[in-house]
């Protein structure tokens, strides 16, 4: 039954591609100007839901003839699967404020997305709002099928109490280089300040590499993506240094190979975590934490460190009939005023040029978030390429086997994965 359902979904997806995911150029042109009620989805995160409700209320009050109906992304194994199924069924909402950049190429291939460049001010709006970082979100045809919306630049949180127990400086801990990080990790474990120094998820889902290998790779390379110009970048000398660092962490039992069901950092099982500013509210009253940039093999100034963005974006879906309204709502929801309300509600960083300067009062009142605003200017996104999720899974399979479980030489595993990824990246 599952095989039949999968084959049917593929056939339906192919038919959508064949017809462009809409009713043809004429219908698309008409839809781009059409105004009226629209549906939108947003994340089920409580803070984002609260922001979404006030945004929708503000819009509906001012535009009673173009009402927005909003709901959380329906429950499912993952939001990506739910959205993909909605595209196939032809009933996706106009806007989804929870679109993963890793899924954009697949959604685009399904014919499910509207190029924002199709609006007269589309390209300019995206680039004026986000600045240079917007370039990472272009598709291979040079168009924007997603608006860079909000990021959670990941950094290394550390537990000050655990570090103090291990005799480590809690104001400026030695974590800038791999050697320093390893030495600090060993002190923490030896002192039994925590069972493990750090506890990234050792499971094999494609996205787990975004919170162990990828931010370290971004830092080590000065901002490279996993794939660039159709070629895998992770089997480089820098990539192999990162892999060797993590292999040592696992081999020396400084990180665990077993899945953890809770939050290892909050529970005190791990003394460090690689995570973004969304976690600050979670840690409040539970962990006395500090934060530093991810390390590199040779210490780089914090102002030069890049990291993974952990972004979610806004996309317009081709089932939308009233695209004129949808475009206006998208701009309203990502205006400087609404971005400020989003920042205040969630602590996540709007993907705007110089977010610190845009909201000085917020960061003056919330200094814990300032370092993340600074880091937000140097983030690396997942590459916007065909077969993106398959590429990440191919990498993760090799990483898990070699780095986490030590069943293969890390360099050999990365070289083999790179060959597979190169072939995948060439496919349309």
Image: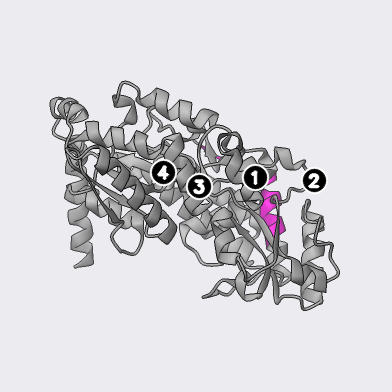
Task: Pinpoint residue 230: horizontal percent, then vertical percent.
Answer: 49, 35
Q: Estimate the spatial distance between the alpha carbons at disc 2 and disc 4, rounded to whole Å.
A: 33 Å
Q: Estimate the spatial distance between the alpha carbons at disc 3 and disc 1, rounded to whole Å.
A: 13 Å
Labelled pair 2, 1 in contact (Cβ < 8 Å):
no
- Where residue 304 sits, quadrant-wise, is top right
Residue shown at 47% from the left, 26% from the top = 128
Q: Estimate the spatial distance between the alpha carbons at disc 2 and disc 1, rounded to whole Å.
A: 32 Å
Tell me if 316 is positioned left or right of 391 in this view: left
Task: Provide the residue designation for mark 3.
Answer: 343
- Camera-side residue: 338 or 119? 338
Task: Pinpoint residue 296: horizontal percent, then vertical percent.
Answer: 74, 48
> The residue tagged with tag 1: helix, strand or loop?
helix
Task: Provide the residue designation for mark 2.
Answer: 298
Task: Provide the residue designation for mark 1.
Answer: 364
- Where residue 38 sits, quadrant-wise, is top left
Tell me if 331 is positioned left or right of 60 in this view: right
Most prominent secondary structure in the magenta stretch?
A: helix
Q: Is residue 331 magenta?
A: no
Q: Nearer the viewer, mark 3 or mark 1?
A: 1
Q: Is residue 165 above or below residue 42?
A: below
Residue shown at 28% from the left, 51% from the top = 84
- Where residue 179 sits, quadrant-wise, is bottom right
Residue shown at 24% from the left, 54% from the top = 85
Sooner in the amino-acid sequence: mark 4 or mark 3: 4
Task: Provide the residue designation for mark 4.
Answer: 313
- Camera-side residue: 117 or 40? 40
Residue 53 can be seen, yes or no: yes
> The residue tagged with tag 2: helix, strand or loop?
loop
> The residue tagged with tag 3: helix, strand or loop?
helix
Q: Estimate the spatial distance between the alpha carbons at disc 1 and disc 4, rounded to whole Å.
A: 27 Å
């Amino acid at each position: 039954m599952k095989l039949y359902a999968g084959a049917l979904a593929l056939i339906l997806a192919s038919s959508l591609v064949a017809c462009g995911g809409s009713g043809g150029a004429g219908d698309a042109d008409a839809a781009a100007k059409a105004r009226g009620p629209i549906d939108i989805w947003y994340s089920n995160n409580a803070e984002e839901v609260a922001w979404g409700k006030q945004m929708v209320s503000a819009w509906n009050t001012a535009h009673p003839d173009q009402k927005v109906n909003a709901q959380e992304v329906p429950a499912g194994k993952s939001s990506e699967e739910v959205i993909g199924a909605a595209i196939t069924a032809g009933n996706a909402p106009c806007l989804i404020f929870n679109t993963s950049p890793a899924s954009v190429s697949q959604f685009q291939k399904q014919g499910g997305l509207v190029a924002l460049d199709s609006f007269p001010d589309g390209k300019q709006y995206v680039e004026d709002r986000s600045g240079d970082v917007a370039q990472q979100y272009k598709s291979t045809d040079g168009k924007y099928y997603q608006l860079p919306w909000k990021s959670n630049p990941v950094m290394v949180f550390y537990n000050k109490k655990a570090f103090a127990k291990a005799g480590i400086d809690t104001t400026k801990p030695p974590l800038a280089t791999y050697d320093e990080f390893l030495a600090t990790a060993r002190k923490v474990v030896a002192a039994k300040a925590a069972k493990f120094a750090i506890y990234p998820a050792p499971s094999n889902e494609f996205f787990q590499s975004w919170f162990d290998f990828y931010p370290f790779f971004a830092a080590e390379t000065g901002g490279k993506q996993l794939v660039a110009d159709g070629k895998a970048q992770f089997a480089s000398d820098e990539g192999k240094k990162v892999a060797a660092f993590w292999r040592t962490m696992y081999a020396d039992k400084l990180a665990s190979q077993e899945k953890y069901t809770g939050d290892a950092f909050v529970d005190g099982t791990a003394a460090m975590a690689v995570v973004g500013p969304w976690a600050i509210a979670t840690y409040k009253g539970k962990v006395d934490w500090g934060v530093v940039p991810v390390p590199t093999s040779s210490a780089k100034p914090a102002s030069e460190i890049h990291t993974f963005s952990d972004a979610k974006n806004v996309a317009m879906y081709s089932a939308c009939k009233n695209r004129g309204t949808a475009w206006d709502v998208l701009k309203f929801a990502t205006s400087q005023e609404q971005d400020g309300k989003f920042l205040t509600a969630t602590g996540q960083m709007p993907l705007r040029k110089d977010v610190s300067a845009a909201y000085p009062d917020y960061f003056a009142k919330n200094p814990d978030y300032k370092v993340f605003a600074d880091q937000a200017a140097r983030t690396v996104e997942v590459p916007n390429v065909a077969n993106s999720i398959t590429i990440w899974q191919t990498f993760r399979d090799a990483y898990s086997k070699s780095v986490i479980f030590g069943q293969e030489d890390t360099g050999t595993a990365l070289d083999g994965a790179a060959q597979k990824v190169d072939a995948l990246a060439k496919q349309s």
